[in-house]
Image (tube, grey):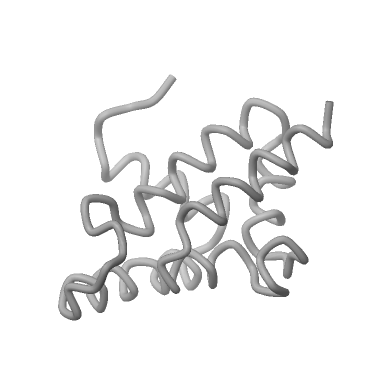
Amino acid sequence: MYRDDPLDDEAELRAIVGDDPVDELVTAADEVTAADSATDVDRTPVEVALDVLRVLQGWADDDAAGRWFLREQRRLDGRSAVAALADGDYDEVEDAATAWVAAQG
């Protein structure tokens, strides 16, 4: 179930992924807004990370989900999901998460 309280959601993301990676996503959101780039500015990297986390939690425990966010991945050109989200590559991260979940079944 998705909760509406962003503070609780961000706290959960921090508990699973870690403070430093989430801080990187928060900083990236500020930079995207400032740059007003072609990136999907309707969603922040933290919001996308939370959506991806919900998908992963349906198939893996929190420890495995946390490792997934931090591990370098071939589908993300050798970057971690956190780094790819910070770069604004939301669709690529969502696709990588979906592929990883499919491989778990």
The answer to whether residue 25 is left or right of residue 34 is right
Residue farthest toward the front in the current orientation of the protein: 38
Residue 7, position in %: x, y? Answer: 27, 45
Q: Quadrant of residue 76?
A: bottom right
- For the point 53% across and 62% down, the residue is 18
Q: Quadrant of residue 6?
A: top left
Q: Quadrant of residue 27?
A: bottom left
Residue 39, position in %: x, y? Answer: 31, 65
Question: Foreground: 63 or 82?
Answer: 82
Residue farthest toward the top in the current orientation of the protein: 1
- For the point 44% across and 19% down, the residue is 1
Question: Foreground: 76 or 31?
Answer: 76
Say how many tags the image has. Answer: 0
Vertical placement of 38 versus 43: above or below? below
Question: Foreground: 68 or 75?
Answer: 75
- For the point 39% across and 25% down, the residue is 2
Question: Foreground: 75 or 31?
Answer: 75
Q: Quadrant of the C terminus?
A: top right
The answer to whether residue 33 is left or right of residue 100 is left
Residue 97, position in %: x, y? Answer: 64, 45
Residue 83, position in %: x, y? Answer: 54, 72
Vertical placement of 66 versus 76: above or below? above
Vertical placement of 64 versus 56: above or below? below
